[in-house]
Amino acid sequence: MIRTKIKEIEESLEIVRENLPDDVREFTRLGIVKDGIYKRMEFAIENVIDICAVINTDLDLGVPSSEEGIIANLVKKNVVSKEIGDIVRQMKGFRNFLVHRYGDFDDRIAFESITSGMDDFNQFIEAVEMVIEDRS
């Protein structure tokens, strides 16, 4: 299940990369393509959170009451580093922003978050692959 979710993350990121312009001005004018980029980012982040929940369950780390509790369990039990925990928390915050469109949604800030955060997914995937390796 985790490997399937990793593949879904990678596929979503590839679609985003293929459609994400280099320029923020062009990004703000993308229309429905921009909405698709937002949806793919949301989907990728949902998969990150799902992977965390699966690992938490598989390792029997307890039943947290929230997504934050899942992340905290993984960090507390040294399953992932504090840095990876912080990355996942930032992703979760961005996902919430995308889903709920709090206040005035700023495409410029979103563009910067997407472009600067792409490598975060790779760091997360590498950490998860190490967890899978260690547990095999």
Image: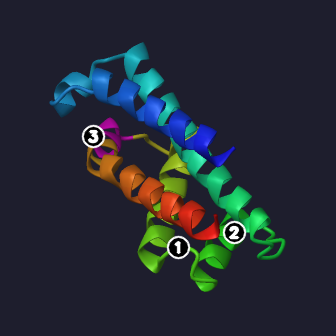
Hey, what amino acid is under mark 3? Arg
Foreground of the two, 94 or 71 = 71
Left or right: residue 125 compared with residue 24: right
Amino acid carrying mark 1 in the image: Val
Q: Please report whichever mark, 1 or 2, sits nearer to the chain's N-terminal start.
A: 2
Q: Position of residue 110 (x, y in %)?
A: 35, 42
Question: Foreground: 76 or 117?
Answer: 76
Q: Which residues are magenta?
A: 106-111
Query: Given the image, on which type of amino acid does mark 2 rest?
Result: Ile
Foreground residue among 53 and 108: 53
In the picture provided, is 105 more to the left or to the right than 133?
A: left
* Nearer-N-terminus badge (3/1): 1
Q: Which residue is drawn at the image coordinates 67% and 50% (left, top)?
A: 50
The answer to if 109 sits in the magenta stretch is yes
Residue labelled with disc 2: 70
Residue farthest to the left, as pictured: 23
> Which residue bears the numbered disc 3?
108
**Mark 2, secondary structure of its residue:** helix
- In percent of width and height, residue 84 lies at 45, 68
Q: Is residue 72 above or below residue 119?
A: below
Asked whether the viewer can see residue 101, the reply is no
User: Which quarter of the rendered picture does the N terminus lie within?
Assistant: top right
Front disc: 1 or 2: 1
Image coordinates of residue 18 in percent, x first then y, are 30, 22
> Which element is circle 3 on?
helix
Callout 3 environment at 10 Å: few (<14), some (14 to 19), or many (20+)? Answer: some
The prevailing secondary structure element of the residues shown in magenta is helix
**In front: 29, or 41?**
41
